[in-house]
Image (spheres, grey):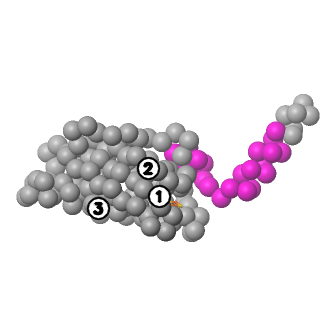
Amino acid sequence: MLRTNLNLGAERQMSRLHPYSDKVMDHFTNPRNMGEIADADAVADVGNPACGDMMRLYIKVEDGKIVDVKFKTFGCGAAIAASSMLTEIVKGKTIAEAEKITNRQVIDALGGLPPVKHHCSVMAEEALANAIKDYRLKHQGSGS
Ligand code: FES
């Protein structure tokens, strides 16, 4: 009983120490759509020069719709959570819909990020924009 109370106390202390929402913690510890797509229609690499973190995004497009999306992120927990949430938002969207997605939407869907971590979600927005640019270059005139 004493041990349980001590553990509960430690957990409360931890949650006071970290400013992350349950959603951020969920996507950080259990990222969705992590990996690569061997036959991707477009791939984008982005990096954050301030911290050296990197993200690669793959998209698979059919009939103008993003039917699959995967990511690999070498970065902080917020960047991994933002990458994961981005893929959930993007999947099933048309190219035209996907290119309107912003990092603000990703932050909101995560239940917020500390202001000092907002830049981590910008990497996800840039990766998506670059992947769409790559897709358009390779498939001129399609999917828009
Ligand atoms: S600290 Fe580099 S992306 Fe978060």
Secondary element at image label 2: strand
Depth check, front residue: 83 or 107:
83
Residue at the spot x=54%, y=46% of the render?
Answer: 28
Disc 1 or 2, which lies upstream in sequence? 1
Q: From the viewer's perspective, is the residue at label 3 or at label 2 nearer? A: 2
Q: Is residue 9 highlighted in magenta?
A: yes
Image side of residue 13 versus residue 97, left or right: right
Disc 3 or 2, which lies upstream in sequence? 2
Image side of residue 68 versus residue 28, left or right: left
From the image, give the main secondary structure of the stretch colored magenta: helix
Q: Which mark is residue 53?
A: 1
Q: Is residue 31 above or below residue 136?
A: above
Depth check, front residue: 2 or 126:
126
Q: From the viewer's perspective, is the residue at label 1 or at label 3 nearer? A: 1
**Residue 23, position in %: x, y?**
55, 48
Q: Amino acid at mark 1?
A: Asp
Residue that numbered label 2 is attached to:
73
Task: Quote the CA–CA distance across marks 1 and 3.
Answer: 18 Å
Residue 128 quadrant: bottom left
| Highlighted magenta segment, given as a residue range | 7-27
Disc 1 or 3, which lies upstream in sequence? 1
Q: Is the distance from the Cβ of mark 1 to the nearest ligand 1 atom less than 8 Å?
A: yes
**Residue 93, position in %: x, y?**
27, 50
Image side of residue 31 versus residue 138, left or right: right
Residue at the spot x=36%, y=59% of the render?
Answer: 46
Q: Which mark is residue 129?
A: 3
